[in-house]
Image (cartoon, coloured by chain):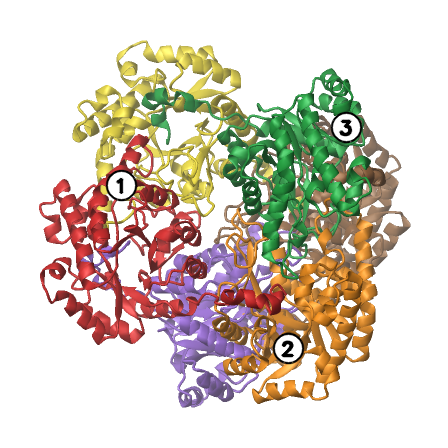
Chain colours: A red, B purple, C brown, D yellow, E orange, F green
Amino acid sequence: MQRPVTLFTGQWADLPLETLAKKVSQWGFDGLELACSGDHFEVRRAITEPQYVQSRWDILHKYNLKCYAISNHHVGQAVCDPIDSRHKNILPAYVWGDGKPEGVHERAAKEMMDTARAAAAFGVTRVTGFTGSPIWHLLYSYPPNNFAEIEKGYEDFAQRWNPIIDVFEREGMKFCLEVHPTEIAYDFVTTRKALDAIDNRPGFGINFDPSHLIPQFLDPAAFIGEFANRIYHIHIKDSKRYLDGRKSILGSHLNFGEAGRGWEFVSSGHGDVDFESIIRALNRIGYSGPLSIEWEDSGMDREWGAQDALAFVRRTDFAPSAVAFDAAFRRDQTTSQAAS
Amino acid sequence: MQRPVTLFTGQWADLPLETLAKKVSQWGFDGLELACSGDHFEVRRAITEPQYVQSRWDILHKYNLKCYAISNHHVGQAVCDPIDSRHKNILPAYVWGDGKPEGVHERAAKEMMDTARAAAAFGVTRVTGFTGSPIWHLLYSYPPNNFAEIEKGYEDFAQRWNPIIDVFEREGMKFCLEVHPTEIAYDFVTTRKALDAIDNRPGFGINFDPSHLIPQFLDPAAFIGEFANRIYHIHIKDSKRYLDGRKSILGSHLNFGEAGRGWEFVSSGHGDVDFESIIRALNRIGYSGPLSIEWEDSGMDREWGAQDALAFVRRTDFAPSAVAFDAAFRRDQTTSQAAS
Amino acid sequence: MQRPVTLFTGQWADLPLETLAKKVSQWGFDGLELACSGDHFEVRRAITEPQYVQSRWDILHKYNLKCYAISNHHVGQAVCDPIDSRHKNILPAYVWGDGKPEGVHERAAKEMMDTARAAAAFGVTRVTGFTGSPIWHLLYSYPPNNFAEIEKGYEDFAQRWNPIIDVFEREGMKFCLEVHPTEIAYDFVTTRKALDAIDNRPGFGINFDPSHLIPQFLDPAAFIGEFANRIYHIHIKDSKRYLDGRKSILGSHLNFGEAGRGWEFVSSGHGDVDFESIIRALNRIGYSGPLSIEWEDSGMDREWGAQDALAFVRRTDFAPSAVAFDAAFRRDQTTSQAAS
Amino acid sequence: MQRPVTLFTGQWADLPLETLAKKVSQWGFDGLELACSGDHFEVRRAITEPQYVQSRWDILHKYNLKCYAISNHHVGQAVCDPIDSRHKNILPAYVWGDGKPEGVHERAAKEMMDTARAAAAFGVTRVTGFTGSPIWHLLYSYPPNNFAEIEKGYEDFAQRWNPIIDVFEREGMKFCLEVHPTEIAYDFVTTRKALDAIDNRPGFGINFDPSHLIPQFLDPAAFIGEFANRIYHIHIKDSKRYLDGRKSILGSHLNFGEAGRGWEFVSSGHGDVDFESIIRALNRIGYSGPLSIEWEDSGMDREWGAQDALAFVRRTDFAPSAVAFDAAFRRDQTTSQAAS
Amino acid sequence: MQRPVTLFTGQWADLPLETLAKKVSQWGFDGLELACSGDHFEVRRAITEPQYVQSRWDILHKYNLKCYAISNHHVGQAVCDPIDSRHKNILPAYVWGDGKPEGVHERAAKEMMDTARAAAAFGVTRVTGFTGSPIWHLLYSYPPNNFAEIEKGYEDFAQRWNPIIDVFEREGMKFCLEVHPTEIAYDFVTTRKALDAIDNRPGFGINFDPSHLIPQFLDPAAFIGEFANRIYHIHIKDSKRYLDGRKSILGSHLNFGEAGRGWEFVSSGHGDVDFESIIRALNRIGYSGPLSIEWEDSGMDREWGAQDALAFVRRTDFAPSAVAFDAAFRRDQTTSQAAS
Amino acid sequence: MQRPVTLFTGQWADLPLETLAKKVSQWGFDGLELACSGDHFEVRRAITEPQYVQSRWDILHKYNLKCYAISNHHVGQAVCDPIDSRHKNILPAYVWGDGKPEGVHERAAKEMMDTARAAAAFGVTRVTGFTGSPIWHLLYSYPPNNFAEIEKGYEDFAQRWNPIIDVFEREGMKFCLEVHPTEIAYDFVTTRKALDAIDNRPGFGINFDPSHLIPQFLDPAAFIGEFANRIYHIHIKDSKRYLDGRKSILGSHLNFGEAGRGWEFVSSGHGDVDFESIIRALNRIGYSGPLSIEWEDSGMDREWGAQDALAFVRRTDFAPSAVAFDAAFRRDQTTSQAAS
């Protein structure tokens, strides 16, 4: 019950920031993770209009909210992805431009650099987001992959993102990749490979989100253990498997919430994520940043759910033991009781 | 946290209705499902005494309680069952009469028709109850069943209940069978067959109670999905399996609460029912009626438990997502974030 | 690979004994457990016709087959059961008589006494069979049982069977109840109660058949451990649960083999019975009698299956360790290696 | 132990047909499922060279082998897929042509029509294969799918395949889609949709292969049950999950056999497929065609494995029960024993 | 929500009793189980200083706290253990003396007799503690145990503890062994043997603590059932298994809290103990004494955790059913509803 | 089916080598792993009598048996262990001497050096065995361990074994520790620490035996993966957990085979070891040495079991895929079929 709890605003972009801030403050959140969507945080204005970033803080301060991170998932996705019509819907018009892939890639890369600058100007140290992936569509090797092409995918990623990370590091910022299907890293193996591809440089780390690991049968706490020194930000989000022999873990090309899917995102505390193990792992690695609730559940009222999730996080996030500090002292008197 | 929560009064028939109503109101329930037991709801008086139904409402209104359904489980049981001495204990004397089976069957059928009339007079639209079964005792096929006799059992059921449902439909009432061992329908297969036997007529549906499915290893949420258009009423009741290789799932002819049973009824939220999946299923099919707690737990104080169960239901019954309503709007702006 | 393996002839009663004996001998069985069905073993003839039992042995000897036990399941069932039309199909006409229950009970009891005498005359020491149950139909307590009636059921059983066991003990025979749903004993609890009801007298023991324990989630090896001194005969029979949330463990009033059942009998080695644990348990208690395959599988060719089951038993039935006999000797030299 | 067992030749295309036929015959297979790879079966020659199909039969007959089906997986894949460089490796040069997508699609469609004609000329009634998919790459909905595009994918499939199926039906052939990731149908939901898209016309059915269902946590026997009337051919192939919290079920973009994958294809009988349930399901639906072993296991010697798989199939493929045929007879005498 | 909840003070011995009492009272505990550590309870002073026991009560009363038991785990351990340097740290100097084993054993035994006297003087009836074990170090039989030596271990235990229990029984006290690895009894088998070794005399019983059973895969509720008449005191403590194929259940010689252990003690309600089953078992056997929280969790703040554990116990400890008391009455009217 | 299969002779030391060799040869084994027990292999004679080693080979050759390793588990155990009376039973008299611990340690260390020399003289390259452990008895930290003492235990081990390994390395031998409870290394953590303590010198590796990992819930195949370059020899031995909530995984101080133990050693193929995963792991790391069956099962006849285990190993030990060798070739033609 000690880390600040923020709400990620991506799923609330239909509400003006002020409307959302007022609600969230009343619900008891400590702050917001501002998404570059709707009027929540606009990169271009932040680096061109002198008063813009202050206008954001004015709203936040009015409702007594903090901010530790900016999200720019959509634009990051366009840096490495093969571009198709779906990207048009998620990009600002000036990034999409004429939609020719290489131009989109370049403008997206430039926008991510600007996001680093904007976030720095805003006064935070984390940008969360996606990278896209040149090889995601080769997930299932049929027609058989040429696996050299897979290796080349990691190199492409490095080539496109290294210049962006240069800017992040220059600005004192960390880019925090949300490990996620469709990204260059989505599991243990690919995260190892992606970090290796950029020589584990410190400007690039992880926005840990356990909800994407559950449908892959991965162990979130073990993930924190292995990548401890690159865990830069935390999303609290849950997912649940509904496997009964008829529903595929691959999702059946069904939209979230449609009957028949093998898994769904659910409000935190309602799914298969073991958040207590995550809190213990975060205590162990000394993470003291915010816990940012990304709320998404196609079967639950959004406002009821956000409050429910906040209460869940508050009661789950306990402080680590301080007793270890006086272990020498206690050895004589107290730890002798340790195993009774 | 939106559906009304009522208490089924069957397990409290030792208390006068007013005593019970006062307690239940203080505990925070929204209403009662009145059982035809004790002085809670008496069919004969309801159809013969002009003031009787108002007298019931007076008590309910005094304590600010609603009522959506009347239960007449015991009498319904006698419609199809082979009659034995156990039925005497659960029937009004005027239904038991001389106890000769065919007479009991006929008087029980007539009483169920009267229950429809009484409930209609009282102003509710649901009667919950049992049907009995002419073939339950043939559950395990040894000596080997003549399976034509099983089929004949469904026909007998239809023959005895169709005239009753005629009255229900005439009165604008729904009979809600609690799918349950010892009834004509106790699982998926037998529910399909029972509904088919009466041509799926709308006056006959289901009082869904998950506690009877758990000891059969059935999936309650899937049951709601399959029989969605016949889910007319909901009982919130829980059960728990205690299987350790020495305890039989069949119950060992032990009474509830005796050591050694392989399963027990327990206070809701303390057993193996996954109520959240049930709520999600009810949200999906659009059920907006009451959630009626049937409280039974041989190892827990009744009054402590009823309050505990109410609190459990309140925090489990969340509203469905309203975001789908503006999906078109959100597609351009927000759902693009959907999978992050 | 040391105990004799016999085939129980009940499921083959459509074949004359000689036809069956020839097949079974060719398949490699060591013997038969003769059922009182078809021409396999006829109690009345065995005690009235001087040459009859020899005629049975002549057939067996011709095909080099042994016999350790006679089965009379059907008649035993009629001793305690409430009699209905199904019993007519499984009883000899002279036992059924006019079908009036008390007369059937008495003639069935007398026939079981005669079975003891016939089996003794035939030269075996075991009769396997059923007891029936006066209370099986009260399995699920609704309408609520008067549990004093349950206790009375065990007393009735004792009263009806004690005179039969008198004859068994006089003849040096053991009656071996197949613990089974519809019998007085079908699980741990009811077996304890049934044995207690007859004061654990030695003439009454168990024909252990694990296939009836699996659908109850009971542990067959633990059953052998607890009732070790009453395990008088062994049936090798298997069953399998097919639970998927839609199929009930109670069987849905479906016949064996119908789609939709939650469990089935299957050829031994194809189900959920862990036969190796059973063999280890039998080794531990020192059972050296026959393993009698009761073959039943509604989805497999009978003759293919019987041979498959025999091969399965042969490779599963290993000898117990003899090393324990020289443990004193080995302690100095060899068992020092024991845990390496 | 009654259905013919064939070997699918796709994984052996490096061996001339005669070499392979000789080996396979010695190992004891009953026949081959000829792949359109290497010199095994060449469509163009089959429809242009008068002696060609006889030359194939000559080899088969020489080694006493049967053939029930031709496979043309690779070309079928190119009918609907977005074409990329990987397709070049799997297509005959005359189908690939200049590699421009629409031309490839058309030539592939024409080649599949010719495959139907060639197979008919060869004298079999089944062609197994793939369809490709215009929407597979949209598996994970980020950037968010426009789900209307998914629906359009099924329509595209229908539009491209209906003319091919016209030829199949005209020739008296069945096309048998191997339900498989990267195809229009890969699970229950998508198989339903794909069959609906072509109005369940009889010329298009399923080559059932359980190995592709295991990594999706699907129930192969239930699949056979649901699509019983479209199960036209069977592949016997196995796969195994190696999930330990570190390995992703999605495969991590690793090739088969690389350490770290969450699942692998393995020799039949060595994985997670429950083949006995499949045999029981095939017995139930009356499938009497061949069981065609598709052998693939990156960790086992190919020749050792093919023989091991054959032995496995022989001992697993038991005949259905014939006893049901005389059920009426047995009811009086024998089935009375049914549940003992 | 009816049994008193106390805090065991062993893990808080670094705090003076008054400091601890104040905190604990504010948190809402009902009392303390005083450990003979720090200044919490000193045996020597209790039997030599006339005012000492009153001084302890004064502190307790000041904060409105009760006390039902004294703990002297450390000294009990030294009665039977092979003595090594670790014991020096846990024993009062006057018990350790010169550290020669037999002298330590004798002084420890005498101190336990004095503890009985001191506790009696203080006015409680329970002393919780350890016994030590002469054979614990022979846990894994290599070099192979002479199992006669194991039997002798139980005899040694009896010989050393019988005189101590004499004093306990004389003083009207119960010694309550915490069944625990390193003690003479740590599981079902060894508890049976230990109780047998002292002829089940009533002065020696069990301080039930489920946290020590979980890493052994034992069933705590079944333990209460079997040893019902020797359950004299309850510790509420939890533990959790973290097995993933790399972590050993044996603990790897790692200290609690070190990464890599296969199990840990955790704050109650956060582990694998099913406390509800324990409460039901305690209700069944009629235990009405205190529930004493022994708080230990190497990954959680101690003060946050103690309050969390208290809240957990309060909401888990429900009263047994009182309805059984009027069962006779209800049989006619209400229990007829029992199974609906 | 390609690696040689040997029998470890430790459990057969009551038989003269020639007697055993004759049996084993008839059963079809390829060779023996000679234990320094009975007359199987005597170190002192091997280094002092010129003809001794040849006499052993004469017997082996007579029965066409190979030998790849000598075992000296018992003497190795005495190098680091706290010495007690149990060691007397497992040591040659000249090693035990007067039994004073430090002398025993020294003589045991010298004997292990001689074992290296003797095995070298005999012409093998592997000695399997134990190390003992100075800290095993501190397994459960109560009285609380001083964990510095644990660290010192690894140092002691290194100090005592480094001089022995010097001799092994000089002689071109590998010492192969059987990772096992009571040894310095018994799981992943302690194996890492033990190997680190001796700086991972190549003369010291592992005799992999999965049976000791199962009762610790460890993953044997993962163990091979992690310690791949130190896997020098393989024992094929199995164990099985019998946990039912009443039996402790710690073994309850019961001897192997006694009723009530939570786990047992069982004949290979009859327990919880997944040998196929082990074979796949060995194929992956390229282990081509012998598979040495260590046969131990307290519930099975020794001679029946040894043959059963041999047959099990033969059918489980398949060759790795050779197809990878021609992968370049197949890429164009065949692997294109890879995922169908």
x, y percentage for residue D268?
A: 49, 31
Residue shown at 57% from the left, 40% from the top? F198
**CA distance separating discs 2 and 1:** 66 Å
**Relative to residue E179, is residue F310 depicted above or below?**
above
Label 2 is found on which chain of the structure?
Answer: E
From the image, state whether disc 2 or disc 3 is nearer to you. 3
x, y percentage for residue F90?
A: 77, 39
| Residue neighbourhood size for the residue with mark 2, other residues' Cα within 10 Å, grouped as few (<14), some (14–19), many (≥20) | many
Label 1 is found on which chain of the structure?
Answer: D
Q: Quadrant of the C terminus of chain F?
A: top left
Residue C96 visible to an observer of this rendering: no
Residue D104 visible to an observer of this rendering: yes
From the image, state whether disc 2 or disc 1 is nearer to you. 2
Three-letter amino acid code of the residue under disc 1: His
Mark carried by residue E34: 2
Q: Residue furthest right?
A: C170
Disc 3 element:
helix
Q: Pick the residue in front: D267 or B200.
A: D267
Q: Pick the residue in front: C114 or D184.
A: D184
Q: Quadrant of the N terminus of chain F?
A: top right
Q: Is residue D179 left or right of residue E81?
A: left
**Relative to residue C185, is residue F128 depicted above or below?**
above
Disc 2 element:
strand
x, y percentage for residue E290?
A: 63, 77
| Residue neighbourhood size for the residue with mark 3, other residues' Cα within 10 Å, grouped as few (<14), some (14–19), many (≥20) | some
Q: Are marks 2 and 1 in contact (CB under 8 Å)?
A: no
* Residue at the disc numbered 3: F44
* Residue at the disc numbered 1: D137
